[in-house]
Image: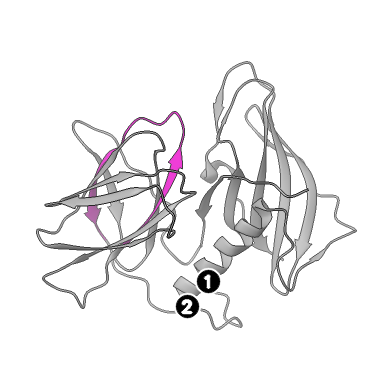
């Protein structure tokens, strides 16, 4: 059966910047970002979010579907985002006064029941240059991230990616993260990566918010929660991750 699914993803690439999350204090939350690499942040799917950029003359590049219902508008050093029905929104913000320098790349993940976010972007560190560690692939960072995203999209649609086959001998291992129990469903294998599917269930008595870093383990490169990130007691959702074989 084909599923129309909303996916909430994070790419966990060991040789790139790990997923970062805005730290809330007084006033806007602060998100540390590394120009030239991607950062991932949850935003409200129902209300307008604000990003405050560190450039007085920002140049904004946005990636949206032609039929998008999302809205991305810049006013001075602030960018206002309404996510509409997008699964995620990719933005690149560059310093218009220094256009040859790497920009800040953001993937905004719409999440229900998250209040409107007001986030101050704070550049730090240096850009990553080179390969992702998969030396035989010949892929740069952007191409490798696109590959992972496409694998997750195929998984959400219950489609087998080109070059992957079902591992009929895989039994998998149960995952237990607090009150969340993960039952293995199936595994697809490619040349260097595997896509593994799980059914997650909240076995506790209170609502649980799923968080990608809680599920990260050695070799896991990307994680997607299909449809839900907030699980009521007894509620289930699907999770897919891409990992090294």
Q: Is residue 51 above or below residue 192?
A: above
Which quadrant holds residue 55?
bottom left
Mark 2 = which residue?
140
- Inspect the magenta stretch and tell me whether residue 51 lies in it: no
Q: Is residue 243 above or below residue 74?
A: below
Residue 181 placement (x, y as % from top left): 71, 33
Q: Secondary structure at mark 2?
A: loop
- Measured in 3D between alpha carbons, the distance from the residue under mark 1 to the one under mark 2, in whole angstroms, is 6 Å
Counting from the top left corner in percent of width and height, residue 5 is at: 62, 45
Res 40 visible = yes
**Along the horizontal axis of the image, is 147 left or right of 38?**
right
Q: Nearer the viewer, residue 15 or 84?
A: 84
Name the residue at 69% across, 72% down. 192
Image x and y of residue 48, in percent: 30, 37
Magenta residues, start to end: 105-124
Q: Which residue is mark 1?
A: 144
Q: Is residue 110 magenta?
A: yes
The residue that appears at 59% across and 81% down in the rendered structure is 137
Tell me the quarter of the image containing the C terminus: bottom right
Drawn side of residue 222 relative to residue 239, left or right: left
SS for dot 1: helix
Do the numbered discs 1 and 2 sit on residues whose CB atoms are within 8 Å?
Answer: yes
Mark carried by residue 167: none
Principal SS element in the magenta part? strand
Residue drawn 50% across the image and 66% down it: 145
Residue 199 or residue 78, whichever sits in front: 78
Residue 180 in picture, x, y percent from top left: 66, 31
Dividing the picture into quadrants, the one containing residue 119 is top left
């Amino acid at each position: 059966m084909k599923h129309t699914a909303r996916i909430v993803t994070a790419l966990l690439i060991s040789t790139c910047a790990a997923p970062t999350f805005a730290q809330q204090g007084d006033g806007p939350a602060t998100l540390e970002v590394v120009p030239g690499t991607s950062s991932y942040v949850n935003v409200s799917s129902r209300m307008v979010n604000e990003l405050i950029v560190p450039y007085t003359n920002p140049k904004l590049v946005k990636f949206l579907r032609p039929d998008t219902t999302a809205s991305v508008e810049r006013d001075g050093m602030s960018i206002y985002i309404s996510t509409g029905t997008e699964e995620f929104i990719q933005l690149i913000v560059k310093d218009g006064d220094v256009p040859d320098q790497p920009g800040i790349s953001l993937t905004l993940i719409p999440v229900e029941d998250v209040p409107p976010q007001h986030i101050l972007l704070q550049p730090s560190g240096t850009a990553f240059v080179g390969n992702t560690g998969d030396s035989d692939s010949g892929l740069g960072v952007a191409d490798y991230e696109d590959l992972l995203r496409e694998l997750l999209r195929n998984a959400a649609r219950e489609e087998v990616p080109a070059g992957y086959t079902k591992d009929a001998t895989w039994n998998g291992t149960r995952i237990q993260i607090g009150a969340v129990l993960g039952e293995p469903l199936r595994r697809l294998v490619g040349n260097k990566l595997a896509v593994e599917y799980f059914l997650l269930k909240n076995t506790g008595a209170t609502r649980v918010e799923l968080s990608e870093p809680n599920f990260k383990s050695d070799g896991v490169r990307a994680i997607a929660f299909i449809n839900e990130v907030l699980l009521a007691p007894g509620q289930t959702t699907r999770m897919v991750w891409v990992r090294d074989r």
